[in-house]
Image (cartoon, helix red, strand yellow):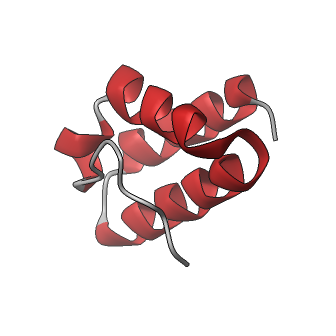
Amino acid sequence: MTLDKARELLNVQIGLGSGYNRNAARLILAEIQREHGQAGVDQLIKELHLDQHFGCKVGEVIRI
């Protein structure tokens, strides 16, 4: 998955904003982590403020 596609999907999850969407966001981040590493995950967390929306932290290893 590209970072652009992940950004698009995460914006949908942010718009919906429930606990289920937090799980979906973590699945997206796990995919990014596999393909782009921790730097890609951290970039999206910072850029989309996922710490505020879903409690994701920069440097956090996403385990699903």
Image: 3 above or below 36: above
Q: Residue furthest bottom?
A: 64
Image: 17 above or below 37: below
Q: Position of residue 56 (x, y in %)?
A: 30, 52
Instruction: Looking at the picture, tell me which residue is in the foreground, 27 or 39.
Output: 39
Q: Position of residue 40 (x, y in %)?
A: 59, 33
Q: Residue at x 70, y 23 (%)?
A: 4
Q: Residue at x 35, y 47 (%)?
A: 59
| Rendering quarter of residue 53 | top left
| Rendering quarter of residue 9 | top right
Q: Position of residue 31 (x, y in %)?
A: 70, 56
Is 8 on the left or on the right of 54, as rendered? Answer: right
Image quadrant occupied by the N terminus:
top right
Image: 14 above or below 22: above
Q: Residue at x 31, y 70 (%)?
A: 19
Image quadrant occupied by the C terminus:
bottom right
Q: Position of residue 17 (x, y in %)?
A: 32, 52
